[in-house]
Image (cartoon, rainbow, N blue to C red):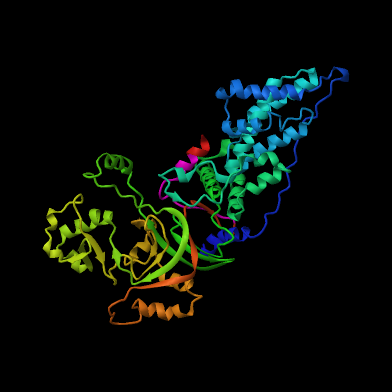
């Protein structure tokens, strides 16, 4: 399969940010026309004041025992509106069917319609309408409950389409750090919608990949449950999980004319511009944290001075701006790597530091590494820091691509070229290693003639047989370019084929459990 096929829907998603979404036609609603009572004089007048009183009573006496998901929001809305009913029209069965159809449409997004009280409301409205038109009896308490359940269901459905069910920002295990500032949620918006179908359609992610995953999900969902194998169920769940991921935050915005996009499970990077793929590359990402991480982390918190902090090298999911490139970078070794790896290598090989081009510092003072008794040093009392000179052996390779983030994560070259031959390329300390780093640099700097391919090759020593002393150079982008590091385990290519990637960090289950609650 060609790489451009994999990313085509990302590009379509970028375009969708700039093109208004076409409004879908509301589905045909089937409903039962209720027979009127023969003696119209016997039809009681529906007392909306009585219904208002029952709604207020519900919040005064029964709400603490209710099944409302958005109790505070629903109560606040009705309190602000003097407990007047908003949805209920006892004589309009078509309208009631429309409300139920909207809640039922949750299934098309991989959501459970009963999260929004569908079955309970369907039963309530069926019985209430039947008894009213057949017997003339009115159960105001049950009408009030139905009004409130409908409000709760519609508010929750609004939030789930706008921001998702699972909140990755609140779950440290997910390692998700994309800003939520573009997903402001106005909970009462559904009450002011002129057309409910259009309202919910506009909440749906505009990215075309969402639509194609949704279609694939529905196609597979139509298969009878009795004939579904475990593999079919697994695929449906993976599709549900990735639909949910697209709902969290709008990854591509109108300002993103150029984007560097990394998909962790696919181990791929793409540079996108408008409707074009400018280049692509294999990447290596952070290694999965060990299964014992949680236990070790708890032990570390109890005694941080004597217990080493456990490694967490999974690449974070984030969006930022690449502001500059460093050619021939030096590497200041992070403390955890120094304690867990460098020290161990020194104790095994007394020439390790000089052979690998490391300098040793006590504070800011350069010292002779042979003046230290390294066998007497432990991870707990290591106070020295290490810097690796630019060169062929440097862990960052010949180039790194910088964007500000609290994890000190960036894109970079690597001397470990064989890692790009692996099927599972989750092998780094958290940064993203880029196989085609030179092509990436040339692509990002293409609008600045000074930094052409010849300049880049010469500066990093690729055009010289005898590599001279390499000089570290910072090259700034103008303008900075968005970088998105993402996590998607399902993808649809341009031919409509579904691709499932390995859940390398085992995060699908976290999302699926939230969807199944």
Expressed as whole percent of the image width and height from the top left, the position of residue 139 reads: 72, 19
Note whether 198 is above or below 263 in the view shown.
Answer: above
- The residue nearer to you, when weighing 119 against 201, is 201
Q: Residue at x 24, y 47 (%)?
A: 308
Magenta stretch encompasses residue 319 = no
Q: Residue at x 61, y 25 (%)?
A: 59
Horizontal relation, residue 186 to residue 500: left or right: right
Expressed as whole percent of the image width and height from the top left, the position of residue 194 reads: 73, 43
Expressed as whole percent of the image width and height from the top left, the position of residue 17 reads: 61, 58
Q: Residue at x 34, y 48 (%)?
A: 289
Note whether 240 is above or below 394 in the view shown.
Answer: above
Magenta stretch encompasses residue 499 = yes
Q: Visible in this render: residue 39?
A: no
The magenta segment:
496-512
Note whether 201 is above or below 2 in the view shown.
Answer: above
Horizontal relation, residue 354 to residue 446: left or right: left
Expressed as whole percent of the image width and height from the top left, the position of residue 172 reads: 41, 44
């Amino acid at each position: 399969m060609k790489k451009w096929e994999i990313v085509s829907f990302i590009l379509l998603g970028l375009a969708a940010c700039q093109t208004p979404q076409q409004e879908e036609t509301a589905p045909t609603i089937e409903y039962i026309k209720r027979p009127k009572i023969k003696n119209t004089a016997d039809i009681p007048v529906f007392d909306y004041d009585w219904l208002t009183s029952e709604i207020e009573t519900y919040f005064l006496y029964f709400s603490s025992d209710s099944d409302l998901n958005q109790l505070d929001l629903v109560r606040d809305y009705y309190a602000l509106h003097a407990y007047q009913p908003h949805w209920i029209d006892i004589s309009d069965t078509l309208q009631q069917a429309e409300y139920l159809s909207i809640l039922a449409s949750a299934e098309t997004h991989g959501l459970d319609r009963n999260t929004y009280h569908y079955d309970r409301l369907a039963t309530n409205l069926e019985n209430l309408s039947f008894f009213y038109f057949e017997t003339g009896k009115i159960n105001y308490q049950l009408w009030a409950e139905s009004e409130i359940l409908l409000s709760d269901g519609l508010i929750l459905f609004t939030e789930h389409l706008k921001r998702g069910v699972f909140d990755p920002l609140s779950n440290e295990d997910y390692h998700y750090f994309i800003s939520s500032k573009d997903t402001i949620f106005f909970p009462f918006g559904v009450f002011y919608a002129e057309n409910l179908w259009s309202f919910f359609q506009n909440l749906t992610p505009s990215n075309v990949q969402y639509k194609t995953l949704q279609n694939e999900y529905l196609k597979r969902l139509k298969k009878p449950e009795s004939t579904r194998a475990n593999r079919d169920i697994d695929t449906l769940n993976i599709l549900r999980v990735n639909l949910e991921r697209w709902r969290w935050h709008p990854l591509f915005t109108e300002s993103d004319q150029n984007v560097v996009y990394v998909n962790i499970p696919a181990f791929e990077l793409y540079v996108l511009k408008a409707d074009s793929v400018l280049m692509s590359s294999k990447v290596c990402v952070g290694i999965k944290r060990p299964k014992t991480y949680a236990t070790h982390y708890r032990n570390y918190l109890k005694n941080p001075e004597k217990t080493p902090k456990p490694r967490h090298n999974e690449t974070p999911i984030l969006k930022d701006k690449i502001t500059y490139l460093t050619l021939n970078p030096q590497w200041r070794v992070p403390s955890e790597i120094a304690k867990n790896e460098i020290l161990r290598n020194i104790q095994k090989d007394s020439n390790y530091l000089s052979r690998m081009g490391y300098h040793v510092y006590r504070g800011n003072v350069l010292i002779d590494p042979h003046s230290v008794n390294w066998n007497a040093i432990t991870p707990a009392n290591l106070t020295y820091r290490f810097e690796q000179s630019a060169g062929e052996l440097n862990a960052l390779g010949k180039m790194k691509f910088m964007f500000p983030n609290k994890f000190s994560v960036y894109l970079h070259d690597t001397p470990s070229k064989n890692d790009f031959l692996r099927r599972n390329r989750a092998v780094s300390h958290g940064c993203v290693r880029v196989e085609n780093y030179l092509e990436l640099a040339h692509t990002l700097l293409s609008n600045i003639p000074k930094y052409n391919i010849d300049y880049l090759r010469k500066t990093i020593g690729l055009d010289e047989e005898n590599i001279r002393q390499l000089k570290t150079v910072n090259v700034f982008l103008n303008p900075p370019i968005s970088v998105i590091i993402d996590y998607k385990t399902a993808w649809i290519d341009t031919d409509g084929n579904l691709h499932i990637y390995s859940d390398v960090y085992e995060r699908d289950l976290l999302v699926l459990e939230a969807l199944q609650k």
